[in-house]
Amino acid sequence: MKTNVNILWVLTAFFGIVTVAYVVWSLLDPAHGTVEWAGTFMLGLSALLVAFIAFYLDKVHGAQAGELPEDRLDGNIDDGDPEMGFFSPWSWWPIFLAASAALLFLGLAVGIWICFIGLGLGLVALTGWVYEYYRGLFAR
């Protein structure tokens, strides 16, 4: 992870240098002679975004008290935490829930009445997903 952070810091410096070069180039261009603001802001904000990500990952790496087993080159998959949670591989309810969310956002773009259909289907899909293990073949 430390290597990734160092790459991101290098990328931040790259975007900073390119931003300065872009400003100088636009000032030296005889056709314009002024700063081209859209590209300057885009490159500057790209440098800022990469700097934020590098700073965050640097702080996370420092807070985890050493290198994780997953980050070592000689580490195996089993070296990390064995259980990440319980997920149903055969469940169709997340697909129905995603389709109802798509209908909800489609309703925001096209017509508000579609939102009510998406909301109703979303409530049915969420209820089905929550109570999936309380009925039917997989009841416990």
Image: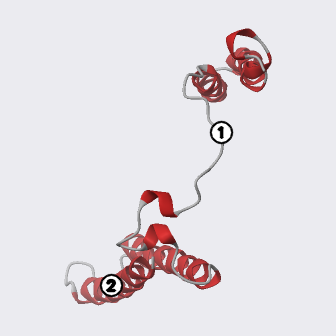
Quarter-wise, where is residue 99 in the image?
top right
State which quarter of the image contains the C terminus.
top right
Which of marks 1 and 2 precedes in the sequence?
2
Q: Residue at x 60, y 77 (%)?
A: 60
Q: Is residue 125 above or below residue 48?
A: above
Please provide percent x and percent y for residue 64: 62, 78
Question: Residue 18 location, x and y as percent?
Answer: 31, 83
Residue 111 screen position, x and y as percent: 66, 20
**For numbered disc 1, what is the local secondary structure?**
loop
Residue drawn at x 40%, y 76% as measured from the top left: 4
| Location of mark 1 (residue) | 86
Question: What residue lies at 47% left-to-right and 66% top-to-bottom?
Answer: 70
Tag 2: amino acid: Phe
The quadrant in which residue 105 appears is: top right
Q: Secondary structure at mark 2?
A: helix
Tell me residue 59's x, y (percent): 60, 82
Judge whether residue 3 can be spotted in this image: yes
Q: Residue at x 21, y 84 (%)?
A: 29
Q: Residues within 10 Å of mark 1 (few under 14, many from 20)?
A: few
With respect to residue 137, does 54 lie above or below? below
- Say above or below: 22 vs 107: below
Residue denoted by label 2: 14
Number of callouts in the render? 2
Along the line of sight, which residue is nearer the eye, 16 or 74?
74
Color scheme of the displayed model? secondary structure
Image marks 2 and 1: residues in contact by CB distance under 8 Å = no
Amino acid marked by disc 1: Phe
- The residues bearing labels 2 and 1 have C-alpha atoms spaced at a distance of 42 Å
Q: Residues within 10 Å of mark 2 (few under 14, many from 20)?
A: few
Q: Relative to residue 35, is residue 111 drawn left or right?
A: right
